[in-house]
Amino acid sequence: MTATRSRSSRSSKPGTRRPAAPPSPTLLLSEDPPLSLLDRWIRLLDRSPSRRWLFYLALPAVLIAGLHASSWTCGALPLASISLQLTTTAVISILALGGIHHIDHVAGRALLRFRPAMPSHGLYLHALTTIPSAALIGAALGGTALLVLVNLSDPTFYGMLATGLCQRPFVILVGWVNSAAIVLTAIISLRHLVWIRRIHAATPTINLFERFPLFAFSSLSSRLALLFAAGTYGFILAYPTSLDDPATLAYLFGVNLPLMLVIFIYPLYGMHLRMAEEKQRLLAESARRIERALATLHEGGEGKARSDLDPHRGLTSLIEEESYLRKIPTWPWEPGTLTAVLTAVFLPLMLVVAQQVVGRLLAG
């Protein structure tokens, strides 16, 4: 009994405690209910690297092989030939879910970085890292509507059904899953944009001298814009015939391009206004201090009574302070972030336009 107690007392000493285990990736995601089926699946993937390998590599390979086998059997493709369109169609839904999985972790890390500016940041973890079941239902319905619209505008389904109806059920099923995944990604992106605005609006104080936490959500909004751009230009590369449709071109240039910039800037605009307002307040206080320093400088009698202070040096310091305040940025993102987003959005677009121009010139 005595030996047991002594061992217990020794093991309870602070110096003999075992080091804590490294944090799990799931700590970035909320575990509080309610969790949708997709939330549970994402957390299940996080707990096992082998599951992630199987889901993100093995499953796409199986889908690619199955879709091609269907085309070979139906005679839509020569045996053993590979179609970029079929390959892309097979993996769109997996890529979309991978993007959602990635964005959940980016949102969790952004919220942790934002913690110094928002002590109650934990209240928003569930909203940023979970997907409501209603969103899954809406994605299923929206995916059905999107699939119908695609079939009405292009009955050949981007050429994959041009050779007959044999593989139609398989292609349509995969197309519906892809459409639902695309709609779900759009719903989740919109949800994140709204919640970023709400979190910024609920921030109690804005400290421009400790502004790096204020940049936290620029990583999330920029990642959303970049994923949106990657999906768009990847679709164009996989389905080049889509550019022959005037409606598709109108959407890409009239809707899609501005939307990428809106995804990045819109959620951060509220914080920009608050930072600009705080900057104006600091500049107004600095101007009042400079005004008082000038008044003291012009009052020679009081200046002698305070011979320990040099009014000229004090005025110079205040002017330098005002100059520093004027240089404080009021857009909540790291230097270079906007350049990276603009490059990712416009560079592929320029390449697409150049390809189309060169193609038309060579065809003519």
Image (spheres, helix red, strand yellow):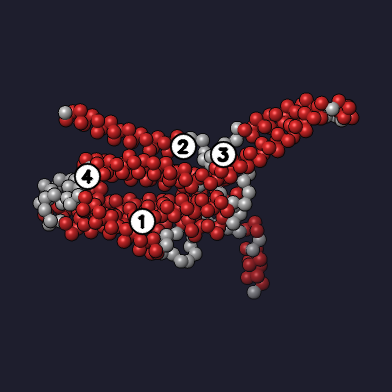
User: Would residue 6 be visible to someone looking at this image?
Assistant: yes
| Residue drawn at (33%, 45%) of the image | 231
Label 2: how many Cα within 10 Å (few below 14, some 14–19, many 20+): some
Q: Residue at x 63, y 49 (%)?
A: 205
Determine contact: label 2, label 4, CB under 8 Å: no
Instruction: Please tell me the numbered disc located at residue 338.
Output: 2
Q: Nearer the viewer, residue 290 or 66?
A: 290
Query: Relative to residue 345, is residue 68 drawn left or right?
Result: left
- Asked which secondary structure carries label 1, the reply is helix
Residue depicted at 25% across the width and 32% down the height: 355
Mark 4 — residue?
Answer: 84
First along the sequence among labels 1 and 3: 1
- Report the residue marked by disc 1: 184
262 to the left or right of 141? right
Say which element carries label 4. helix
How far apart marks 4 and 3 lie (CA) works out to 45 Å
- The answer to the question of whether label 2 and label 1 lie on touching residues, with beta carbons closer than 8 A, is no
Q: Which residue position is annotated with label 3?
A: 330
Earlier residue among tags 2 and 1? 1
In the rendered image, the vertical position of residue 60 relative to residue 296, given as above or below = below
Residue appearing at x 62%, y 63% in the figure: 11
Q: Position of residue 92 (x, y in %)?
A: 29, 51
